[in-house]
Image (cartoon, coloured by chain):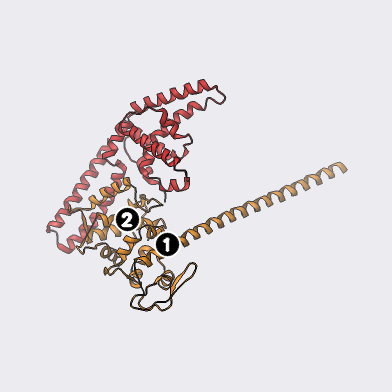
Chain colours: A red, B orange
């Protein structure tokens, strides 16, 4: 059981496809899935980019610095590193992944170019990727994700909690009775969860 | 123990090296815990705890209550998020067959959990009670107490002999382990686990090589047969 259905759950939410948020999340999901295909030396990319101190960029820089530090520590054991690789780092450098894709797609056109044109293209690609970083909605999405969990994940958690609490309510009623304040408290929580679920379903219906 | 497929915990995973959840996973787990904490005490009582475990695992009531009593180390009748997190890590370690690694990485907390009476010693009974949690088999338990009970408490004279890999006691009395002996056990178990993995990998590679060799032979045989047939047909045509 590896890093699978977290991302599957991100992509499998039933939200409306016409909303821009959902498009961003799909892009996000694809980016994290393909992170293992990175083959460009990242410290070079990081040195080229002139990053502002905003949250996605600072995360990118931090990740680059960490990778550079690990490289200099004299061992890039891919097997171990993959095993110890944390989920937040995957999401952090998916931004880089998008950057690199653009660069690699431009670079693939030059198989036997001359050096000057190569460097010009690299500069323009890093600039264009910077512009893309500045203007894409990823920043807003990142800011939101700092405080909130993805909706499909919340749905899964709430549905499961609802099932557990409904069974617990039966035990409460049989053990301490319907009128006990703990039973009533549990009942209120269950009703709250049900209301949230029905709200979500109504939103999806629209 | 199997986690229920499609349940929330089923989607979580441990870092394979440290056998812990990532920060993001912990954040999600906190939210989940708060959903179950209907009385807003930052705790789960025994009823909620039972229904949670009953929903996500295939454990029986007796096993669930054993785990609850183990985690309720203050005897408050409730467990907080720290204990809940520990439990989730244990469940995920079992689910992903990382028990040896988990016990090796977290030998101190595991020892403290098993030491129910707080005597800084764990007897065979403790292990036996919790072997469904850590998947320690009977044979391993026997070896554990035979090989690692160095001090052999309740015996003033202890004679032991150090062999290359095994330290054993000549006159074991009441077999109980202190923390150091338990730590030794985790180290040796980890070594065994790694050796087992190595041999499994080697066996797999051998099987793959053998398959390839067989395939090659078959291909060659087929080529030979077809070349013979073609030479036969060409000869018969030339005669005609």
Q: Nearer the viewer, residue B178 or B240?
A: B178
Work out how far the residue at label 1 is from the one at label 2, CA to CA, in angstroms.
23 Å
Quadrant holding the C terminus of chain A: top left
Q: Nearer the viewer, residue A177 or B176?
A: B176
Q: Which residue is mark 2?
A: B88
* Residue B186, quarter of the rendered image: bottom left
Q: Residue A82: percent from the left, percent from the top?
A: 44, 46
| Contact? badges 1 and 2 (CB < 8 Å) | no
**Relative to A170, is A37 above or below?**
above
Residue drawn at x 43%, y 31% as measured from the top left:
A45
Name the element at disc 2: helix
Q: Nearer the viewer, residue B207 or A46?
A: A46
Which one is earlier in the sequence, the residue at label 1 or at label 2? 2
Specify whether A110 is left or right of A183. right
Residue drawn at x 17%, y 52% as measured from the top left:
B40
Residue drawn at x 27%, y 56% as measured from the top left:
B84
Specify whether A194 is left or right of A97. left
Q: Nearer the viewer, residue A144 or B232?
A: A144
Q: Which residue is mark 1?
A: B187
């Amino acid at each position: 059981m590896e890093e699978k259905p977290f991302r599957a759950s991100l992509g499998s939410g039933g939200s409306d496809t016409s909303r821009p948020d959902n498009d961003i999340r799909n892009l996000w999901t694809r980016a994290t899935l393909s992170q293992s295909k990175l083959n460009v030396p990242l410290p070079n990319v990081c040195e080229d980019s002139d990053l502002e101190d905003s949250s996605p960029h600072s995360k990118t820089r931090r990740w680059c610095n960490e990778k550079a530090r690990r490289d200099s520590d004299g061992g890039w054991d891919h097997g171990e590193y993959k095993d110890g690789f944390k989920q937040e780092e995957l999401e952090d450098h998916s931004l880089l992944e998008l950057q690199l894709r653009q660069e690699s797609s431009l670079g693939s056109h030059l198989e036997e170019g001359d050096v000057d044109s190569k460097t010009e293209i690299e500069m323009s690609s890093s600039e264009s990727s910077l512009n893309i970083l500045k203007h894409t909605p990823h920043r807003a999405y990142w800011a939101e994700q700092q405080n909130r969990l993805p909706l499909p994940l919340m749905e899964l958690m709430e549905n499961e909690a609802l099932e557990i609490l409904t069974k617990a309510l039966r035990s409460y009623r049989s053990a301490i009775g319907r009128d006990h304040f703990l039973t009533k408290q549990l009942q209120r929580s269950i009703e709250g969860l049900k209301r949230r679920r029905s709200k979500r379903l109504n939103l999806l219906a629209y | 123990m199997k986690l229920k497929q499609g349940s929330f915990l089923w989607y979580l995973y441990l870092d394979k090296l440290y056998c812990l959840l990532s920060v993001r996973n912990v954040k999600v787990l906190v939210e989940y815990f708060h959903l179950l904490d209907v009385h807003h005490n930052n705790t789960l009582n025994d009823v909620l705890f039972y229904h949670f475990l009953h929903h996500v695992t295939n454990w029986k009531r007796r096993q669930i209550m054993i785990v609850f009593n183990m985690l309720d180390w203050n005897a408050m009748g409730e467990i907080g998020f720290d204990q809940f997190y520990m439990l989730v890590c244990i469940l995920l370690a079992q689910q992903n067959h990382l028990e040896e690694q988990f016990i090796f990485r977290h030998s101190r907390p595991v020892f403290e959990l098993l030491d129910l009476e707080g005597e800084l010693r764990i007897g065979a009974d403790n292990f036996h009670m919790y072997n469904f949690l850590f998947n320690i088999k009977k044979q391993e338990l026997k070896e554990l107490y035979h090989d690692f009970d160095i001090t052999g408490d309740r015996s003033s004279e202890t004679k032991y002999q150090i062999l290359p890999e095994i330290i054993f006691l000549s006159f074991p009395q009441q077999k109980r382990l202190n923390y150091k002996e338990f730590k030794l056990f985790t180290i040796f178990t980890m070594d065994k686990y790694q050796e087992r993995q190595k041999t499994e990998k080697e066996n797999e590679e051998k099987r793959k090589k053998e398959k390839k060799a067989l395939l090659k032979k078959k291909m060659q045989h087929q080529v030979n047969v077809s070349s013979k047939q073609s030479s036969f047909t060409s000869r018969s045509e030339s005669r005609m």
